Amino acid sequence: MSAPVSHAKGNYRWEDPPDEEKYSACVHCGLCLESCPTYLETGHEQQSPRGRVHLIKSVAEGKLSISAGFENPVFTCLDCRACETACPSGVQVGSLIEAARGQIRKAIPLTGWKAFLHSFFLRGVFPHPSRLHVLGKLMKVYQKSGLQSFLRKTGLLNLLPRHLREMERVLPAVSDPVMKTHPEVIPAEGSARGRVALLAGCVMDVMFGEINAATIRVLTRNGYDVVVPRGQRCCGALHIHAGDREQGKALARQNIDAFLAADVESVVVNAAGCGCALKEYPELLHNDPEYHDKAVRFAEKVEDISQFLVARGYQKPRGRVEARVAYHDACHLAHGQGVRSEPRQLLREIPGVEWIEMELADRCCGSAGIYNLTNPEMAGKILDEKMKAVPDQIDLLAMGNPGCMLQLMMGARKHGRTAAIVHTVQLLDWSYEREARQAAGQSEAEKGE
Amino acid sequence: MPAIDPIVHELARIVGADSVLYQREDLAAYECDGYTVHKHPPRAVVFPSCTDEVAAVVKYLHDQNIPFIPRGAGTGLSGGAVPLGGEVIISLVKMKRLLHVDYENRLAVVEPGFVNLKLTNSVAGKGYYYAPDPSSQYACTIGGNVGENAGGAHCLKYGVTTNHVLGLEVVLANGEIAEIGGVPDAPGYDLMGLLTGSEGTLGIVTRITVRILKNPEGKKTVLAYFDSVEEASQAVSDIVAAGIMPAALEMMDKTAIEGVEAGTYPVGHPKGVEAVLLIEVDGIAAGIDDQIAKIVSVCQGRKVSEVKVAATEEERARWWANRKTAFPAMGSISPDYLVQDGVIPRSRLPEVLEKIRQISERSGLRIANVFHAGDGNLHPLILFDARIPGETELAVRVGSEVLKVCADAGGSITGEHGVGIEKKEEMRYVFTDDELEAQLQIRDVFNPRNLLNPDKMFPKPGRCAEMRAAPVEIR
């Protein structure tokens, strides 16, 4: 309750209230409705983008207070931004939702186990790479020591809530984080054409270190020195989504410093949610006089890996990957960053790929950061809807976001699908690898002659 | 915690507790539809999932003498779904199934909450489509389209909703279920025509049989830019006079172009043009190129500054997205807008536009003009800022003046958006007291207690007798 009065806007009394310019742009036309997964699920106006913006505006106008009845629709939003793609007048719903969440968390702080989990994970673990790595190690021990199979056999895991149980079943075999396995600078293959930094990410590096390793291989193969700055932290997206703007801002400042110091032409990201958050640092820090300009300079460098490769030109892969492939648009790539064609181009140019365009490819899978943990019931329904659109006859379902990968692994298992869930970059990496192997095999053969 | 309204329990008994909204915040989301000038929260919102539930809800409300309003997606532009008197909203969005498609007889049966565009998408694979295409078709429901007798860009050639409805299942004001139509050219009065466009005052449609059409063999689209609105208007008249029947003939003026270019679907209209025409012809493939050539030459006769034909389907789709999102795109250049819906004889277009321009100048409010020019249906968008005290009222007055101009030019006050709250008083521009009274008598047959969407469509006080007795002046 200590915020300066100047921030006050109706019943928003803390720093960073939802921006009046942004909610004023909504003319209440309703063209967003059919794009909103939670509206499609409930049919309730307050669970639609238009309804939420209307409520956010009503609080600013002092007509509603920040109450549980306001909290529910604002936190039921997936923050998937599909409405932003649909909106004819460019209302930035995601930003409004995130700002409203910040206000709600001030007015109605979390209590009980939710507060504990929030402070333990979001404040205690995610901002600290070393603790995150310990968590990763523990998971590895869990998976490799036989504890996992023991617990699965004993049925003790059945004590977990259903959604956690489902998630536990699909946990990928944890590989080592590149922050540990790779040096800070990995040189390009041959002569360097540029120098880029990689955001290792928190979940990505701990759960999917192999994808980071693949990203580094793809970048170095294309002639880039890759820096993995040791000072980098979690991007803060999860914190901002949860309404913890202070922690989000602290992480943003650390990342800005770490990456600007790395002196690179581009900050390459392979996790859609993180990329979107990084690109939005200028807005997050809009009233930070020291960091705002730096945030702008930083954000200009941020590029999704697919965007980066297609824009700069990349070596066309020649190794065959014989597979029927479909692509799922991560919300924060398609709706958040407008990146749709680049990943498709990367995938379709891989020899041997039989392309299958999926219907409703840009419909949210329900992962939405930690939404599948905080709103498991809704996330489950949205996942079921998503799975209806996933074609049966595919071998691989590619995407550009680790959260979506976990969620869709769960979906595939739940719906008895055999398709493997992969990252776009992994496919490219496989193709390069096969190409290299074939070349090696050929030169062996030539030597033999 | 305020005590829960006792009707909530009764409604929940019919539809289930998950399907009734009554919390303050939830109701606040229902305080207006696409028309935001007047707002009021409903007493409750109830979501029936089948006809029987609609009937049971209506019967309960009727027996309790509680007024109610049917609502679809809430994209209406005249306030038809705004619960001005705190009515109960009956939302039909959970009844959203496509029940049946009969390609042989070219018809489809849908529930009222089925979204307009989804019908076309569902039958497109077999080469069919549903013709009425209001600009809100991405979200609006066919039930709502029936309520408002919605039109769309292509109604110039294909007609409005009423021309495509073949049969209706309706829940009447007392909860009885009635079937209307179903056979072509049914004898007796055209009740379907009466219900279509009745704005929820005569009954609640719960099942709709509509026509579906075979896709035209060919289709081409032209974009033509003009340096004067006058020349563009003349070109519209010339095209029709030349014997061409375009599928759509749309116009946007300079301010409207500014809005759509600032919105989500810009197409790169050149700066400084005064008007753009979007013309589409469709039909048998063989004749289309001739028609396009004729249109291009007509435009050239009217000092067109640039005219081009869409080269690809993507380009055509982009031009349409740009046009169809024109209303909401105004959100990019103005915090609020009020869209009007006048109709005029096509030949009076230049003169009416000049009068609208004068109204804009006098009031100081910018007016962007978007029209279905081919059938003389104008959509002047009055741009304003509701945060400035008095500006909303001014915008409403300006809208009324514009409608007066349309009515005086021999036209009407609404082409496709309905009367709702917005144009109640303006009904007097086109109807005499006796004519209004005759319509109220028809309403009484279906809705004797005036429980169904009360206080919409007709000026207040609605009755001549009451009006004569009323001490205040109306206008």
Image: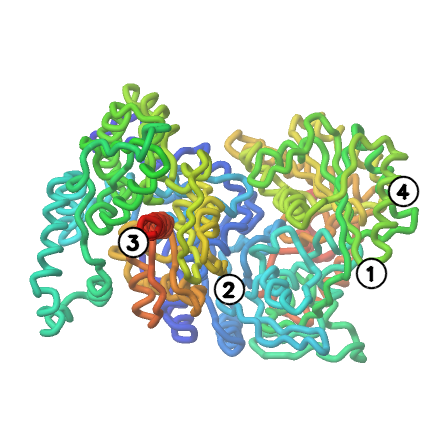
* Quarter placement of the N terminus of chain A: top left
Q: Tell which subunit mark 1 falls on.
A: B
Residue at 23% over, 28% down: A258
Q: CA distance from mark 2 to mark 1?
A: 38 Å
For this orientation, the residue located farthest to the top is: A290
According to the picture, the residue beneath numbered tag 3 turns out to be: A371
Q: Earlier in the sequence, mark 4 or mark 2?
A: 2
Looking at the rendered structure, the secondary structure element under dot 4 is: helix
Residue B418, x across and y down, in percent: 68, 54
- Kindly identify which numbered label has been placed on residue B238: 4
According to the picture, the residue beneath numbered tag 2 turns out to be: B93
Residue at 69% over, 29% down: B270
Q: CA distance from mark 4 to mark 1?
A: 22 Å
Looking at the rendered structure, the secondary structure element under dot 2 is: loop
Residue at 44% over, 47% down: A346
A17 displayed left or right of B359: left
Q: CA distance from mark 1 to mark 3?
A: 52 Å
Whether discs 3 and 2 lie on one chain: the answer is no
- Kindly identify which numbered label has been placed on residue A248: none
B425 displayed left or right of B119: right
Q: Amino acid at mark 3?
A: Tyr
Residue A387 appears in the picture as rendered? yes
